Amino acid sequence: MVSLAAAVPGLWSIEGGNKLVPEQLFHRLVQRLCSLGQSVECVASENAGRPAFRVTWNEVVKGLKSEVFDIVMMASPIEDNLSGIDFIGFDHPITTNFTGDYRHTVATLIEGRPRASTFGVSSAVELPGQVITNMEVPLNFRTLAKNFPVDYNPVMFNASRQLYKVFSIGVLNDTQMEALFESYSEATHRDWLAYPYYHQRKAFPGFVLAEGLFYHNAIEWAASAMEMAVIGSRNSAILAYQYWSGESPEMKVGASKVRQEL
């Protein structure tokens, strides 16, 4: 049902992109940020009394740099080492027990006019706001939906320049694009691993990878959405506070048991 949330009315979006929510939060709360273009290479445990972690990252111009942190929060998939981050010096494997595939999706933003006959209607104006498919019939796309600007005004909006977002399993070629759209002026593709491939699981990864090392994305294997990511981040923040203040010495590494923070 989480996947259908985007098809209901009343959704909110941020001008400039939803990514501005965490970006602005960090800029208001954190004194220093690693800028875009920097990638974390490894997290090494330095057990001298209380656990500490040496994080090494690669800067485009300056090369490798590192710094020691008391707490590290992972917000990148570690299943099958998708993050590409090495975990060194821990007394137990961090990523070995985490396996799972992610759903490969291509998002295409298209300014154009859908081909009505493809969807079994006489004109494009009869199309609903969203077209959602299932896997019973093999198709070249998964969803097709209208996209509107944040400041959308139906009176002022130019319908001839309607923007559509199409999800597909691969980049749409010219033939596939022409089957979906009778005309279009611009198309932009984004190829990504969108969300986990869901199937029955016997266990879920926990929010605690090691003492002081937390994993936001653990909740993604229950359901994947921006709202779920917020819940996962909140859980990690509460656990980190409890760890730092010594409130939860019984915290079990890798535990997936439901706790009060959920």
Image (cartoon, rainbow, N blue to C red):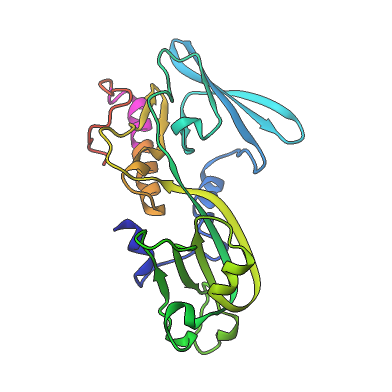
Q: Would residue 239 be counted in the magenta stretch?
A: yes
Q: Residue 149's image quarter? A: bottom right
Q: From what the image shows, is residue 178 above or below residue 206?
A: below
Residue 82 located left or right of residue 235? right
Q: Nearer the viewer, residue 72 or 142?
A: 142
Q: Residue furthest right?
A: 61
Could one spot residue 158 in this view of the protein?
Answer: no
The residue segment tinted magenta is 238-248
* Quadrant for the N terminus in the image: bottom left
Residue 103 located left or right of residue 58? left
* Quadrant for the C terminus in the image: top left
Q: From what the image shows, is residue 180 above or below residue 37?
A: below
The main secondary structure of the magenta stretch is: helix
Residue 240 located left or right of residue 259? right
Q: From what the image shows, is residue 69 above or below residue 15?
A: above
Could one spot residue 186 in this view of the protein?
Answer: yes
Q: Residue at x 60, y 81 (%)?
A: 161
Q: Residue 5's image quarter? A: bottom left
Q: Residue at x 44, y 10 (%)?
A: 49
Q: Give x and y (percent) for residue 9.
A: 35, 72
Q: Would residue 110 be counted in the magenta stretch?
A: no
Q: Residue at x 40, y 15 (%)?
A: 92
